């Protein structure tokens, strides 16, 4: 079956609707108009007959008809008859050769040869001791009224009107749908060329030709978001923004992963080359190879955890954990690394806080945060690991007085591979905080950070407290 465009469909429906409405309206008007015109014709007929009777006087056996009496006036023919039905004087329409017998106070409807309607009205009046008949005849006004003429004109002109209305409707609808066509053409261009920087231009309150507009949710877009179509175009643009950002992130992610894996891989390749040729160096080379392979394995494991968390496939143990003991243990474990940098690590832990979760994952969270605190602290600095209850959550905080984080980077530090400035520390891949956030989320918790550059940072993680059922 042939598929019509929306514009054509709307035009067809609109034209059919218009024709039905016009015919219906004209029919009602014609009916009401005709009834009214016939009423007027009949009442005029009766008035003229009554008026004519006043122009007649009896004089003995005879009648005197005033000379002023007009036997044809306003379309009404008048004739005067004796009591016996003999015509005294008058006029009658030639179209009606056969007239009915006189009948008092009755309107008789007749049709001439052309099918036109006429009304005949007779009235008998007492004059002295005899009677006189006045007959009036009028053609039905319905057929002569200007409305009837207009109706005929409209019916004759109807096909032309329909064509004009359909054409006008088609042009208006086509114009109204122009923004939709522009949206469509932009979307088609994007899917054909893969150019995600392309946007639907929404300036001047219209959506003109598709054009390249690399600005995100533009100010002009907001100003011209007038109707549904503009909202649609605006939504398309913000959807393209999101798709472009996701695409860019994916690209960045792939390049970061490749970069991170390439470094240990090239070390492994060069060291194994040495090991083959240099017998003395072999032992040392194997050590380096082992270290780099472990680094790679660690990286791949972290990526795997993150990818599982993305797809909701991260399997967590559901152990009852004494979070207070765990924090104490991590604090003790990190003590040597901290004192190597002459950093004082203090623990301020509320005892007996229990949570439900995965032992290894929770340790990883606290280790990552304390690792960072040590890494980004200065010599002779201070680190405070604390744990307390905060409503339904256990709040574990790691505070340091280290180098801090610039405000503009605070939002991005949770992103994968994002490092504020690689010169701040040689170690690290930028996956530590991304892992913290993913693991905390997997435990039903959330994270928070506050920092000021040069003064220090504070990382808080909130894990739901385990409530024992009484
Ligand atoms: P990295 O492996 O680089 O440490 P993270 O994801 O753990 O990666 O951290 C991301 C970035 O956040 C780091 O590069 C670092 O610049 C900044 N950062 C994290 N923790 C701290 C901290 N305690 N003090 C200062 N900067 C920090």
Image: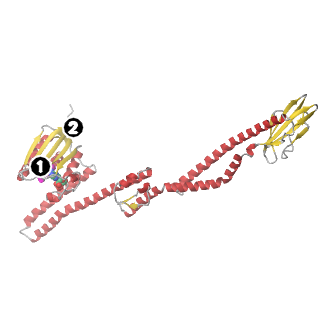
Question: Taking the image as drawn, is residue 319 in sight?
Answer: no
Residue 224 point in image, percent of width and height: 41, 53
Residue furthest to the bottom in view is 277
Q: Nearer the viewer, residue 32 or 435?
A: 32
Region in magenta:
367-375
Residue 325 point in image, percent of width and height: 12, 41
- Position of the C terminus, as image quadrant, is top left
Specify the label residue 401 is tagged with.
1
Question: Taking the image as drawn, is residue 146 in sight?
Answer: yes
Q: Residue at x 32, y 58 (%)?
A: 244
Residue 11 point in image, percent of width and height: 55, 53
Residue furthest to the right in view is 61
Residue 52 point in image, percent of width and height: 83, 36
Label 2: which residue?
A: 392
Splitting the image into 4 quarters, where does residue 426 fall?
bottom left
| 449 relative to 144 in the view: left or right | left
Q: Residue at x 84, y 41 (%)?
A: 71
């Amino acid at each position: 079956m042939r598929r019509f465009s929306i514009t054509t469909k709307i035009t067809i429906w609109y034209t059919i609707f218009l024709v039905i409405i016009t015919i219906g309206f004209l029919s009602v008007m014609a009916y009401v108009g005709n009834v009214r015109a016939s009423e007027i014709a009949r009442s005029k007929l009766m008035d003229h007959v009554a008026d004519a009777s006043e122009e007649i006087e009896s004089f003995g056996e005879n009648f005197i008809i005033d000379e002023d009496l007009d036997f044809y006036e306003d379309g009404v023919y008048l004739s005067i008859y004796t009591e016996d039905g003999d015509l005294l004087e008058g006029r009658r329409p030639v179209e009606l050769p056969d007239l009915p017998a006189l009948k008092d106070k009755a309107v008789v409807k007749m049709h001439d040869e052309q099918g036109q309607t006429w009304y005949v009205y007779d009235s008998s009046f007492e004059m002295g001791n005899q009677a006189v008949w006045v007959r009036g005849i009028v053609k039905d006004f319905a057929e002569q009224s200007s409305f009837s003429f207009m109706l005929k004109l409209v019916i004759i002109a109807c096909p032309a009107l329909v064509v004009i209305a359909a054409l006008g409707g088609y042009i208006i609808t086509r114009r109204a749908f122009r923004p939709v066509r522009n949206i469509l053409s932009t979307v088609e261009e994007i899917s054909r060329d893969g150019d995600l920087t392309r946007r639907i231009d929404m300036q001047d309150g219209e959506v003109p030709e598709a054009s390249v507009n690399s600005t995100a949710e533009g100010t002009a877009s907001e100003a011209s978001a007038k109707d549904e179509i503009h909202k649609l175009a605006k939504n398309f643009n913000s959807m393209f923004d999101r798709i472009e950002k996701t695409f860019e992130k994916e690209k960045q992610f792939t390049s970061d992963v490749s970069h991170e894996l390439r470094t240990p891989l090239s070390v492994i390749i060069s060291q194994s080359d040495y090991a083959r040729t240099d017998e003395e160096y072999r032992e040392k080379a194997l050590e380096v190879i082992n270290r780099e392979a472990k680094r790679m394995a660690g990286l791949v494991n972290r990526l795997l955890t993150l990818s599982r968390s993305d797809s909701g496939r991260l399997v967590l143990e559901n152990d009852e954990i004494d979070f207070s003991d765990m924090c104490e243990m991590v604090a003790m474990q990190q003590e040597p690394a901290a004192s190597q940098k002459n950093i004082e690590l203090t623990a301020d832990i509320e005892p007996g806080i229990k949570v439900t979760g995965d032992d290894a994952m929770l340790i990883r969270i606290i280790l990552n945060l304390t690792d960072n605190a040590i890494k980004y602290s200065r010599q002779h600095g201070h680190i405070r690991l604390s744990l307390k209850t905060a409503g339904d959550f256990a709040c574990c905080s790691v505070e340091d007085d280290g180098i801090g984080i610039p405000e503009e980077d605070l939002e991005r530090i949770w992103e994968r591979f994002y490092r504020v400035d690689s010169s701040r520390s040689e170690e690290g891949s930028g996956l530590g905080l991304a892992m913290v956030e993913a693991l905390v989320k997997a435990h039903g918790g959330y994270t928070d950070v506050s920092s000021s550059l040069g003064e220090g940072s504070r990382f808080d993680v909130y894990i739901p407290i385990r409530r024992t059922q009484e």
